[in-house]
Amino acid sequence: MTDSAPTPVPEVNEEEVRQKKLMCGIFGILLGGLAIHKFLLGYTSTGIIQIIISVVTCGLGGLIGLIEGIMYLMKSEREFYDTYFANKKEWF
């Protein structure tokens, strides 16, 4: 019988997370159709999909970025880290 140790919680640089959250939120709100906020989070394929959605819908896909940007800014630094870095949630 193996006794597995609990997975250690990674140490979080709160200042780095705060800066990333602010940048992603602002880019999501202002330039949501270009998906810069997705690329900043490291979600390249999701960013490309969002750009395609924006092109196909003549820019209406930018609303996704607007909504996500507001959501980013509404979260605490710990929630932002847990959601988008630890759990890799790519959409909303």
Image (cartoon, helix red, strand yellow):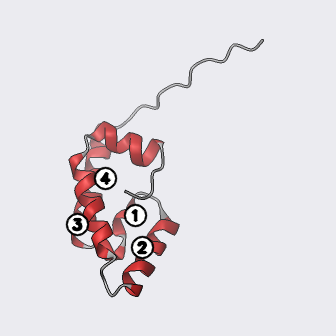
- Which mark lies nearer to you, 2 or 1? 2
On the rendered image, what quadrant is the C terminus found in? bottom left
Q: Amino acid at mark 2?
A: Gln
Q: CA distance from mark 2 to mark 1?
A: 9 Å
The CA span between labels 2 and 4 is 19 Å
The residue where tag 1 is placed is 38
Mark 1 residue element:
helix
Q: Which kind of residue does numbered mark 1 sit on?
A: Lys
Would you name the residue on which mark 2 appears?
Answer: 50
Q: Check contact, mark 2 vs mark 1: CB within 8 A.
A: yes
- Count residues near mark 4 (Cα–Cα under 10 Å), then give few for <14, some for 14-19, many for 20+: some
Where does residue 70 sit, x and y in percent of width and height?
Answer: 22, 57
Crowding at label 3, few (<14), some or many (≥20) Cα neighbours within 10 Å? many
Write down the residue under mark 3. 29
Q: Which residue is the site of mark 4?
A: 20
Q: Nearer the viewer, residue 27 or 50?
A: 50
Which one is earlier in the sequence, the residue at label 1 or at label 4?
4
How far, Cα to Cα, is label 4 from label 3?
A: 14 Å
